[in-house]
Amino acid sequence: MSITTSTSHPQRNALRWAISDILTMARRNLLALFRIPTALVFAVIQPVMFVLLFRYVFGGEIHITGLNYVNYLIPGILVQTTIFGAVGTAIGLAEDLQRGLIERFRALPMARMAVLGGRTVSDLARNVLVVVVITGVGLMVGFRPHGGIVAIVQASLLMLLFAYCLSWGFAYVGLAAPNSETAQAMTFPLIFPLTFASAVFVQVSTMPWWLRPFANNQPVTQAADAVRGLMLGKPHGASTWITMLWSLGAIAVLGPLATRRYRRVT
Amino acid sequence: MSDFAVEALNIVRTFKDGEVHALDDVTLHVPRSEVFGLLGPNGSGKTTMIRILSTILAPTSGVAIVNGYDVVKQPDHVRRSIGLAGQFATVDENLTGFENLRMVGLLNHLEKSYVVKRSQELLERFGLSDAANRTCKTYSGGMRRRLDLAAALVANPPLLFLDEPTTGLDPQSRQDLWAIIEGLVEGGTSVLLTTQYLEEADRLCKQLVVIDHGKIIAEGTSGELKSRLGNTVLSLSFASTDDARRAGELLHDVSSTPANVDGTVVEFTVENGPAAAADALRRLSVPDITVTGLALREPSLDDVFLSLTGHKAEDESATPDEGEPKGRRARKVRS
């Protein structure tokens, strides 16, 4: 009475099934994203508001040496937004846990990695959408990237990689939080210093002396410098390589941490 | 292959570093192609047992063989041979009914075309065709349970775990689910069902195990359990607690099990209700005891518990569910 495909399960197919399971889970998460208006507002509308706020409200007071502020701002906001997107990873996992869905998934013969893999992949897909939207809005408000299309694609891939690797840390937070509200609250002390005490919105040289060592050397500043340099076609030192190192380091540490946490929660 | 759908031997599960014994040396033999009942109050360890048998939770000690596979050593084989549904009806609220079933089918690694066909067939069978393309947020409690059960059936597993499938449902939805479960067993499916309701166990289960504080306190067919219990409960109420206490003493030999004195109410489980009632009233016609009410009723789970353990089933509901850390439990579905 059972179906043949459910019983025949050769080992060589394991990878194929893992990918299939990750895509099934990612698709499920994306369907939910488009059905919950608040989630979509959080993902897309909020960063657009940030662009308008800094371009037209605060921007007049911010002066960048040798650069129009809008050209400084948009690459920074792109980096900030993709990192903010990782909060969704934490919230989504905490919600699944709270609703008992993760418990249900654990009783299915799916790949063990698929819950975390599917979540981080769907958040990556959402980030692709967000990068396209923000770049489009940026162009409308005067952003002029002179780096050329190849460099813009490179910059986009770099920040998507950076945000993806970081999202594994947020996956850990989501699995450690008792509910989605707490998960969201727990991410703020991480997100705020990283994105605001950085070269995302203003130059680090304008900050007080005690903040500069942190702001100069933390990964988000490196990512913002790299993305900005690539998009504007300006020299940006080793920041691309440093960002890639940070990304790989983050996933090497946070990936196993989140995976271990996932195995423990029941 | 083993003769049993489930063989669980000496299962122990502790929480909080051994302080809480959720399961204490439980042994179960669940036969194939019938409904086996695990009866007990909240916090007795029923859900912990289901979680261990469905590979969600590892036992602290003991061996569990499900469909011939060891839950600890061959969890993937176990997962491919079981379906799990229960009181929390863990369907994805943001997906439609159809999408929920398709997701579970694909995660069971079934052919895509088969999953679509099977999902539609199950939605039809469980009266959810009209709601198939609505998100589950809009579903009633009964609809969620049916969809949850349908999800457990997508891969056609030979064994189903149903964790309190009708808790919180209205009588009609409960009847509907019972009929569905009976139909499945007729088709050869084995079912391990947990419940708090004696009525449900009586209707569905051939064999039963009664569990309390993580220990098995009785087992047998529901008929055997009932006959141990007496067939009827005789309930008498009095004008004062003092009257009730004295009546309890006066009538101590009416039942083979001790009387349950609760405030002004005294209850006995008896073999022959009307005869016992007449006898009791005759013996209570003394001037200083005032009887204010008399009722005969079917025994409930409370009565089973009272007669088997000497304490009431509700006493448990105040303790944290299954003794597990709070805050990680699935939220109860409004129904």
Image (cartoon, helix red, strand yellow):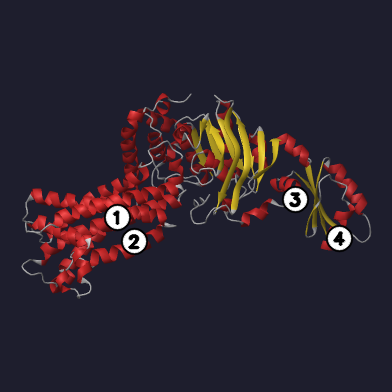
Residue at numbered disc 2: A187
Disc with the residue nearer the chain's start (4 vs 3):
4
Query: What is the CA distance from the residue labelled 2 to the residue labelled 3?
Result: 50 Å
Residue type indicated by callout 2: Thr
Same chain, marks 2 and 3? no
Does the image show residue B46?
yes
Q: Which residue is mark 1?
A: A86
Q: What crowding class fits label 3: few (fewer than 14 Cα within 10 Å), some (14-19), or many (20 or more)?
A: some
Q: Amino acid at mark 1?
A: Ala
Instruction: Determine if marks 1 and 3 fall on one subunit.
Output: no
To which residue does mark 3 refer?
B310
User: In the figure, is residue B3 to the left or right of B278?
Assistant: left
Pointer 4: what residue? B243
Looking at the rendered structure, whether the residues under marks 2 and 4 are on a common chain is answered as no
Residue type beneath disc 3: Gly
The subunit carrying tag 4 is B
| Residue depicted at x 44% and y 42% | A106
Q: Residues within 10 Å of mark 4 (few under 14, many from 20)?
A: some
Of the 4 image quadrants, the one containing the N terminus of chain B is top right
